[in-house]
Image: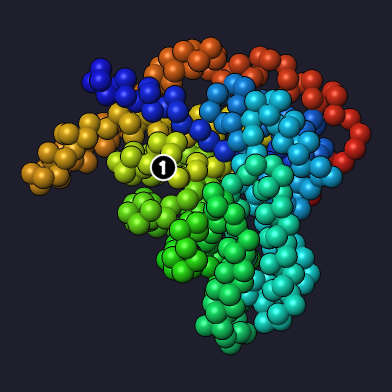
Amino acid sequence: MTDLRARALAALAEQTIELPSWAFGNSGTRFKVFGQPGVARDPFEKIEDAAQVHRYTGAAPRVSLHIPWDLVDDFSKLAARAADLGVSIGAINSNLFQDDDYRLGSLTHPDESVRDKAIAHHAQCVDVMRATGSTDLKLWLPDGTNYAGQDDLRARQDRLADSLQQVYAMLEPGMRLLLEYKFYEPYFYAMDIPDWGTSLLHCLALGDQATVVLDTGHHAPGTNIEFIVMQLLRVGRLGAFDFNSRYYGDDDLIVGSADPFQLFRIMNEIVAADALRPDSGVNFMLDQCHNIEPKIPGQIRSVLNVQEATAKALLVDREALAAAQAGGDVLAAHGALTDAFSTDVRPLLAELRESKGLDADPYAAYARSGHQERIARERIGGTQASWGA
């Protein structure tokens, strides 16, 4: 157990989790977005808030941007500001769901001029990547149909394949296309990339620089997400996670809040495949940005929950598990996982943080810092950032 614990500490010390810039603006549901005092007013303040999460957790050194929500006049200045604060720019996310021209689709639209517009938007995103040093272009396709017969399903896939090829051709060596999927919403009869298989098929056709993004909220209830994780790892095409938590739909709640055992099972597959290594090609990102929790503390809590699930997965007795599986001992095999899941890993993580010169309890340390009260006082005037801006 001592060796297992030491290995877990070493692996946890290298784990990093990317934060979404949009989590630091006012965000919420279709019904209402509740504004909060002190919320970031521009991309520079979003970066400052993300840096606070990294300051207290020591595990969140990158920030995803969303274009056009995070457009600035000079992205090199934004990247430099991030570096000054001890963080860097992560994935660049395109936006294909807030333009009237995209009502019937973007990359799959029947009108070539609309598809060209959507492709040109990705050229803009690649320019942002060059300016910020980002290596990942993340594409969530909201395209789909609401009614049978509304459009030709196969023709939409053909148009999508052609559009993706044009976007993929823009990538430089060392850049990746991360292709996300979602089984419903905003369309309900057929999404154009509804599942991991469709995303994977397009990635395989594109080339080695295309990988799948798995958002933990983008599945039907009861889906065995860790099975999908395992399959994508088997073929080397799991590029990134969007971690959040769900009860019914794409809830985007704090990671691990709804089903911490599911989060543990996912991380167990990651650890079993040795995909926790920084050079594994799997980027652990958050997409948690809901309506009522304060922004910086909410992101801190999500980071801590991912760390706890990871620590428990690292403490699984792999030798005992393998022996039980080989011997057909069903209960012992299951017990090897549940024993690790039941372990209180907070002392282990406290030890890790203290070894890095951090407070053992990042959430409490941030609350004591007075930073939340300070930004509420100082960020007066201007327009607060929000979902969609």
For the point 50% across and 66% down, the residue is 206
* Residue 342: quadrant of the picture: top left
Work out whether 228 lies above or below 329: below
Residue drawn 16% across the image and 34% down it = 320
Which residue shows up at 60% across the image and 57% down it? Answer: 171
Whether residue 352 sits left or right of residue 105 in the image: it is left
Q: Is residue 20 left or right of residue 334?
A: right
User: How was this image coloured?
Assistant: rainbow
Residue at left offset 27%, top offset 35%:
338
- Crowding at label 1, few (<14), some or many (≥20) Cα neighbours within 10 Å? some
| Rendered image quadrant of residue 381 | top right
**87 lies above or below 144:** above
Q: Nearer the viewer, residue 125 or 387?
A: 125
Across and down, in percent, residue 126 comes to 67, 54
Q: Secondary structure at mark 1?
A: helix
Task: Give percent across and percent down for residue 233.
Answer: 36, 51
Left or right: 236 as drawn, with respect to 111: left
Q: Nearer the viewer, residue 257 or 302?
A: 302
Residue 303 location (% of width, % of height):
53, 32
Name the spot of residue 207 as percent of width and height, x first: 47, 63
Residue on which disc 1 sits: 280
